[in-house]
Amino acid sequence: MDDNQEKMETSGNEGQKREREVVIPEFYRDLNEDPELKGLWHYVFRTNGDRKPIKTADGLPHKLDFNWKDMFPNENGHIEVEIGSGKGNFMTDYAQKHPDYFIMGSEWDYTWAAFAIERMEKRGVIAQGNAAMLRGDVFYFLRDAVKDCTVDAFHMYFPDPWPKERHHKNRLLRPDFLTEVARCLKPGKRLFYWGTDHKEYNEIALETFDAFPTCKVIERNTAEPTEGITTGFERKYRKEGRPIYRSIIEFEK
């Protein structure tokens, strides 16, 4: 191979490398309803492949001009959010029981989010028009899209406990998340319903609630399933004899 040919191949390889180096603006995300599954909304940010948002020079997020009527055209002002809806057991029963509530569930995993939508569709909840699923990271959705004082209550039941210590950073219940919850909740009775079977995560979660300003645990570990509705995981865990920890937290304002 002569020098000129080597230089041409090297130059070509560098050109290909430059083509692959695509600069993606940080916090650039799409919020769109799935064209094939009514009620399923995608909010998936562009990343470097590690699920972490790519930072801008100033570190500021891009705020979406979002209103709940974009998701629920007939909403009446009563909005609730379930974090980590799994296969949609709670969402389906709760939305059926309260046709006048508008409830958004959330799941990062597309398969589970789609399963929840299909469950609600079979039960007539999607046609009822008061339930939807967010497929994406609910923390960033709250932070970047949801306006202050627009949510009536939050629900979080049996989330992945990420039991290995090196994975604890993936847990959602942390102070920056509670900051968004407190901001989004309306004045008045501002409730967060929490449930898990994982003792260590429950203890850490309650310590986080206790340490957060304006938080008050009004029922600790002994709350009944919300309006008697149990999740699929809860029914399985109760059958296995595992202890269940349910609490109700109020955010004062």
Image (tube, rainbow, N blue to C red):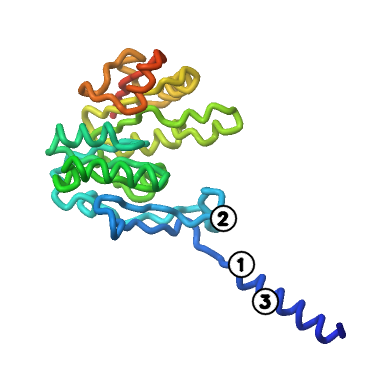
Give the position of the N terminus as an image quadrant. bottom right
* Dot placed on the residue nearer the N-terminal end, 2 or 1: 1
Give the position of the C terminus as an image quadrant. top left
* Dot placed on the residue nearer the N-terminal end, 3 or 1: 3
Residue at horizontal 21%, vertical 45%?
121
Residue 55 place in picture, x, y as percent? 54, 54
Q: CB of mark 3 within 8 Å of CB of mark 1?
A: no
Q: Which residue corresponds to mark 2? A: 48
Q: Amino acid at mark 2?
A: Asn
Residue 15 marker: 3
Residue at horizontal 26%, vertical 41%?
119
Q: Which residue corresponds to mark 1? A: 21
Quadrant assignment, res 252: top left
Residue at horizontal 19%, vertical 46%?
126
The answer to whether residue 19 is left or right of residue 98 is: right
Q: Which SS class for mark 1?
A: loop
Q: Amino acid at mark 3?
A: Gly
Q: Amino acid at mark 1?
A: Glu
Work out whether 80 lies above or below 12. above
